[in-house]
Amino acid sequence: MPTETVAADPAGITRAVALLAKGHVVALPTETVYGLAGDATDPAAVAAIYAAKGRPGFNPLIVHVVDLAAAERLVEVDAIARALATRFWPGPLTLVLPARPGNGIAPEVTAGLATLAVRVPAHPVMRAVLAAFGRPLAAPSANASGTISPTTAAHVAATLGGRIPLIVDGGATPGGLESTIVRIDGGRVSLLRPGGIDAALLGIDSEAAPGIVAPGQLASHYAPAQPLRLDATSAEAGEYLIGFGAVAGDTTLSAAGDLNEAAARLFAALHLAQASGAARIAVAPIPATGVGAAINDRLRRAAAPRP
Ligand code: AMP
Ligand code: MG
């Protein structure tokens, strides 16, 4: 199928909403990475998301809604969830909460789980589409499963071109890392995936919740085509070096050693390195403080042995 890329203007948003209403999937910018959105209440649309990405069916999707009231129609929101939602929504925080029976979400979204992952995105384009569409949107990252996440429309086209009808081009995404995912269960908050919001801000002691794993958090993920070496302070022969701070590299995540800048640039740098034609990629050490924990999580998965 031909893939059309349109500007994120009112006409582009109208076009996206019209396709969604017909059960098609469209790529949209969010404040984290580009998402591949489909009507979360339509099993065929959800199946089209899994098919376009080649995503394993056991890996559940995050549902995006326009505000907390819309989330409350889908999940049970307790006092802790309400406090987190009030503080961090709209924004890159996903809450895994008990699903409300009869919430209309297609069962394929949760891969049969009794919980549902929900988030209220902050990006104006995603918000405009949600408001106009009026229904929840399931939206994983808009890339082929396992490959580097997309932070530009060109990244989306690189792996989904020909597989989806529309990409709404809203420029580079500002945050650059996927959302932080937490589960709230019986008054306990546990971190399922580090992300755009520092877990410390959520008051989570991630050490206190060992062994809690989110389904689909595969060891190898976000992976470039070449092998990746971590904690490199200089390039070996044949390596493309991604720098940080004092380690200059062929490109840098942040010459100033700024972790927020590094988060925003991480996937673009991996795309650059992959396209460089170098036999291997190396990445400078990144401090694991603050959003650095999420950057290191993505780098470890990018470097992990492929299945
Ligand atoms: P992605 O769409 O690639 O950002 O991945 C979303 C991730 O959210 C999945 O890989 C799961 O780990 C997690 N997730 C989604 N729904 C649930 C759920 N109901 N329970 C636990 N984790 C979930
Ligand atoms: Mg993804």
Image (spheres, grey):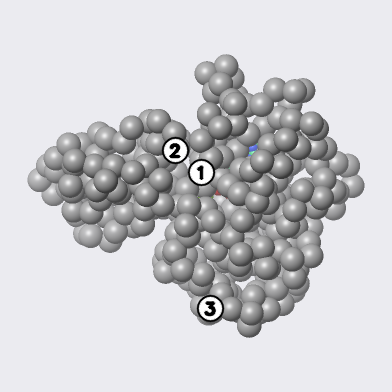
Residue 105: x and y in percent read: 80, 51
For disc 2, the marked residue is 291
Instruction: Determine which of the numbered discs, if any, sits on residue 8 in the image.
Output: none
In depth, the one of 229 and 73 nearer the eye is 73
Q: Is residue 154 above or below residue 142?
A: below
Residue 189: x and y in percent read: 66, 26
Q: Is residue 29 left or right of residue 42?
A: left
For disc 3, the marked residue is 7
For disc 1, the marked residue is 196
Q: Check if mark 1's residue and mark 2's residue have beta carbons within 8 Å.
A: yes
Pointer 3 local density, CA inside 10 Å: few below 14, some 14–19, many at least 20: few
> What residue is shown at x 51% (from left), y 35% (from top)?
198
Residue type highlighted by circle 2? Val
Dot placed on the residue nearer the N-terminal end, 2 or 3:
3
Quarter of the image that includes the C terminus: top left
Q: Check if mark 2's residue and mark 3's residue have beta carbons within 8 Å.
A: no
> What residue is shown at x 59% (from left), y 25% (from top)?
204
Dot placed on the residue nearer the N-terminal end, 1 or 3:
3
Q: Is residue 74 left or right of residue 123?
A: right
Residue 177: x and y in percent read: 47, 48
Circle 2 sits in a helix, a strand or a loop, which is it? loop
User: What is the distance, in whole Å, between disc 1 and disc 3 at their CAs?
Assistant: 26 Å
Residue type highlighted by circle 1? Gly
Is ligand 1 less than 8 Å from the beta carbon at label 2? no
Quarter of the image that includes the N terminus: bottom right
User: What is the distance, in whole Å, between disc 1 and disc 2 at their CAs?
Assistant: 7 Å
Residue 129 in which image quadrant = bottom right
Residue type highlighted by circle 3? Ala
